[in-house]
Image (tube, coloured by chain):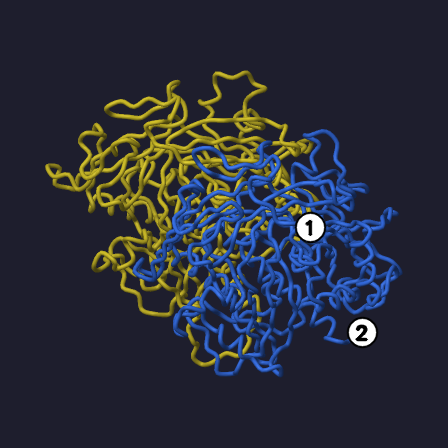
Chain colours: A yellow, B blue
Amino acid sequence: MLPDLVPPVVVRPRDGRDHADRIALSAATTDGVHMRTEDVRAWIAERREANDFHVERVPFRDLDQWSFEEVTGNLVHHSGRFFTIEGLHVIEHDGPNGDGPYREWQQPVIKQPEVGILGILGKEFGGVLHFLMQAKMEPGNPNLVQLSPTVQATRSNYTKAHGGTNVKLIEYFAPPDPEHVIVDVLQAEQGSWFFRKSNRNMIVETVDDVPLWDDFCWLTLGQIAELMHEDETINMNARSVLSCLPYHDAAPGARFSDVQLLSWFTNERSRHDVRARRIPLADVCGWKQGDEAIEHEDGRYFRVLAVAVRGSNRERISWTQPLLESVDLGVVAFLVREIGGVPHVLVHARADGGFLDTVELAPTVQCTPQNYAHLPAENRPPFLDVVLNAPESRIRYEAIHSEEGGRFLNVRARYLAIEADDTVEPPPGYTWVTPAQLTALTRHGHYVNVEARTLLACLNAATAQPRGGA
Amino acid sequence: MLPDLVPPVVVRPRDGRDHADRIALSAATTDGVHMRTEDVRAWIAERREANDFHVERVPFRDLDQWSFEEVTGNLVHHSGRFFTIEGLHVIEHDGPNGDGPYREWQQPVIKQPEVGILGILGKEFGGVLHFLMQAKMEPGNPNLVQLSPTVQATRSNYTKAHGGTNVKLIEYFAPPDPEHVIVDVLQAEQGSWFFRKSNRNMIVETVDDVPLWDDFCWLTLGQIAELMHEDETINMNARSVLSCLPYHDAAPGARFSDVQLLSWFTNERSRHDVRARRIPLADVCGWKQGDEAIEHEDGRYFRVLAVAVRGSNRERISWTQPLLESVDLGVVAFLVREIGGVPHVLVHARADGGFLDTVELAPTVQCTPQNYAHLPAENRPPFLDVVLNAPESRIRYEAIHSEEGGRFLNVRARYLAIEADDTVEPPPGYTWVTPAQLTALTRHGHYVNVEARTLLACLNAATAQPRGGA
């Protein structure tokens, strides 16, 4: 039941308060009340110094409270909490007639069934919406500290099941005040590394006086947009939440109507037949387990390894945990093109073993090129060469971002928007959509994958705030 | 890729052609060009005669091509096609803090991973949209023949993987012409009997001359609305597809805005923790297997049994198959109420073991009362007594419908809309929504469960066409 409201409201418009104008104003505002954008980098560096952490790789045997379970070989925490590393067996048998490409593989996968909260608090200062970002250390971040949502909390963190919570400002999100919710949706994370993991992406507004701790900072969307052009500054969770902001659609339309787009998507979901089941980590074929890493026999894809995190007193280990490390820099790119004067991006209906429901909309290119280096050109992912060989003049957006530092060690990708040639025709499984159509779909889960959400946040930011515009 | 269009369209409005006015006109038209509504019942009876089928229960050992697999005990078809009956183990541990109600149980479940097509063809006659309904025999229907969508086909049926298809008119749906799609969405079926089954619900329009076979009939929405008031006439698949029709929302708003409703739903999904895993049928606790049925030890819930279907020559068995039979008549009801002059229904965020994603929006009451007869009143489902004891004057809709006759034998429920007392306050897990809000959610899967879709189709029909209005 939604809480009773004071004063009582009888009925209200279904589309609710129009946040779009206020979002546009925030996006157009590059001077925040709290900190100048050019000072953010120094502030992050200062927070990095103040919370002096050191991360080092350790052999699995040095993990504390984590171990490989007997029989299954799964890597688990003794409490049963946090996450586990297990095995996944995937069979994909595509084509409208079940006679299309057949792929079958096994891999390690992260299983984390709890739904966490990724919440950004919003508040108007001087009539302009600001968002409360946290400078947060995560052991897998190449630069340790990045800007994260106000709150990042697993269910074990934010509930008091284990006696007390120290998650600051969680009271704004669990549960949120229905009068002040701007975004509240379950969104999935990486389907190639997680088994069906979702987090609750939230933006909630307040009029309260919010205490301002040293690790927090209020920024306008215009400021965040500028920072989105910097490498490894806005963390994955923040990018995901920001992608769900209900920006106004100022365009006259799109190549395909929403019903046509949904029909195309339904067809993609129907024609893919993906069966994924968890298996014991010990049974995974094609991967080998050493003292310090679990890795693919040909050195491709990723490695599972262990790290120890030390606080400023380097003598003492704060905690140890497993992380996933990618073998090389990834490339995540949208081809973009104006159709009838309206910008479009080329999305790919991508099947991953860890998706809850078969396919999600992914960027045009999403891969680690190194994994395909041994293949002839025709077997490499579509458009990869177009992206890798794009001249500077066609690059509309570029930055390096890293994936969630609580699970991934130095997993970095070049995120790009590349202006496509007018002759590009979508192959099967690809279609042109507008960023506004993707934004509308982020109201619901399992449509736009986390990599596409990052690019969407970057593109919406890039539109609101041209590169170098501040 | 969506097919190229002729003439080329550059961009079009995202909300596409407005079908809503034409849907309203069809709903207001109670005279079809093809058949008078009052003649439909006789026509169905005639089709029943013409396709003289007889269904009888048989012991499991008389199943042809079906058998209990060694080791697992799962009931499977020798071809590996169709569906299987397996076991399901469900653990539900609710509450915002993981400290709410705990339920754990095992049960047989139908597993059918293939996505089928449920497609209704539409066409304008005299400027009014008509829909092509099929009088179709299904062995589990109490009255054998009901009105079904134009096409009901499993993937094995409609693809030519097995050489040729005899599914009439399938070419309009696989794939559909994107210029003529009105509805195209994957919707889930019963979460208490199926393990994560979805079908593709489609309405596609044509301007072609469509051959009219004896088992088919063009009807307006006004006619279908009238027939929706008759018992066991419109089958489950047709009700599900019709619930997705994009009716126009003429109301000024709703008790909660769409963002608030989605936020409430996200909270419900987050606070429920449902873990369901398939287990061998042989291992299911609390159920016993006999020669003629698998049933619950206390005789509750449902039975798995086998039937033989004979054609008009009663000597020959056409086919045999397993079906599920409910132990008693079900009750499926919305409490309805006007808030600020706008009709609302009380939805329940219901967790079922077979749902892909934790909870879906269900009617206020959805149960087989017999299963709760042994419990004290306070342990029976909320609002069940309100519904069972409702005076005639408060009944806004009532009809008996049966569930899909290809899987369920005589599974019937009273579908009701009951005018609620003004004092009814939603308990946790329940909230007021407008039918238009539910209709908007049927554009996407996994929001509105199949029982709520049936009631939504009935309510939209009842609104368009008052009882006895023809």
- Secondary structure type for disc 2: loop
Is residue B341 found left or right of B91 in the rendered image?
right
Q: Nearer the viewer, mark 1 or mark 2?
A: 1
- Secondary structure type for disc 1: loop
- Precedes in sequence: disc 1 or disc 2: 1
Identify the chain of the residue marked 2, using the numbered disc in the image.
B
Q: Gap in Å between the C-alphas at discs 1 and 2? A: 29 Å
Q: Position of residue A324 (x, y in %)?
A: 33, 33
- The three-letter amino acid code for the residue at tag 2 is Ala
Is residue B165 found left or right of B31 in the rendered image?
left
Q: As rendered, which of B104 and B312 lies closer to the eye?
A: B312
Residue placed under numbered mark 2 in the picture:
B470
Q: Residues within 10 Å of mark 1 (few under 14, many from 20)?
A: many
Residue A334 in sight here: no
- The three-letter amino acid code for the residue at tag 1 is Glu
Residue placed under numbered mark 1 in the picture:
B138
Quadrant in which the C terminus of chain B is drawn: bottom right
Q: Residues within 10 Å of mark 2 (few under 14, many from 20)?
A: few
Identify the chain of the residue marked 1, using the numbered disc in the image.
B
In the rendered image of this protein, does residue A256 appear above or below residue A120?
above
Q: Position of residue A238 (x, y in %)?
A: 40, 49
**Do the CB atoms of the residues marked 1 and 2 lie less than 8 Å apart?**
no
Q: Residue furthest left?
A: A315
Give the residue drawn at x 50%, y 54%.
Answer: B192
Say which quarter of the image contains residue B325.
bottom right
Quadrant in which the N terminus of chain B is drawn: top right
In the rendered image of this protein, does residue A300 appear above or below residue B290?
above
Give the residue drawn at x 56%, y 79%.
Answer: B390
Q: Position of residue A122 (x, y in %)?
A: 40, 61
Q: As rendered, which of A84 and B143 lies closer to the eye?
A: B143
Is residue B227 found left or right of A371 in the rendered image?
right
